Amino acid sequence: MRRVRYVYPVKLDEEILKALEVITQKLGCSKADAIRDAILNYAEEVRGLEVVKLRNVSREQAKSEIIEFLKGKDRVYADEMADALRLDLRLVSELLMELWKEETVEPL
């Protein structure tokens, strides 16, 4: 089976070119290999990133959802709750503080 190859011309400024030369000297590879490896490393890094589209809800609705989310759970971290409910972490933290002051939740 024949392998398909693609060629992309890339403009590099002096700083990047110098960095590329350092990489090729230290690793003993070609510039093309260094660029390919950099792309693969970057692709691996971003593959693990997760993007959460936040919902725009009122404070009262968010508070209600947090209370419901906490039911039956012994321990939940604010960032886990924010991700699961797709709410802004700052809002979740503020509402948890309110709920704590109201003695609806207990911090651990």
Image: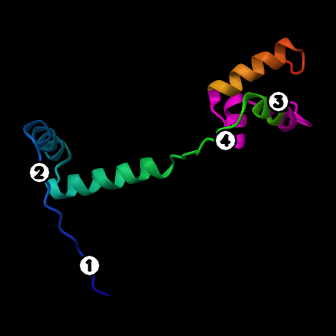
Report x, y in % for residue 65.
81, 36
What amino acid is at disc 3?
Arg
Is 98 in front, or is 29? 98
Mark sitting earlier along the chain (2/1) = 1
- The residue singled out by tag 3 in the image is 75
What amino acid is at disc 1?
Val
Q: Count residues near mark 2 (Cα–Cα under 10 Å), then give few for <14, some for 14-19, many for 20+.
A: few
What amino acid is at disc 2?
Lys
Q: Which residues are magenta?
A: 66-89
Secondary structure, mark 1, is loop
Is 37 in front, or is 51? 51
Mark sitting earlier along the chain (4/3) = 3
| Residue 17 placement, left or right of 66 | left
Q: For marks 4 and 3, give the CA distance.
A: 19 Å
Q: Is residue 73 magenta?
A: yes
* Residue placed furthest toward the left: 14
- The residue singled out by tag 2 in the image is 11
Q: Count residues near mark 1 (Cα–Cα under 10 Å), then give few for <14, some for 14-19, many for 20+.
A: few
- The residue singled out by tag 4 in the image is 86
Report x, y in % for residue 49.
50, 46
- The residue singled out by tag 1 in the image is 4
Query: What residue sits 7% from the left and 38% below the top?
Result: 14
Q: Count residues near mark 3 (Cα–Cα under 10 Å), then give few for <14, some for 14-19, many for 20+.
A: few
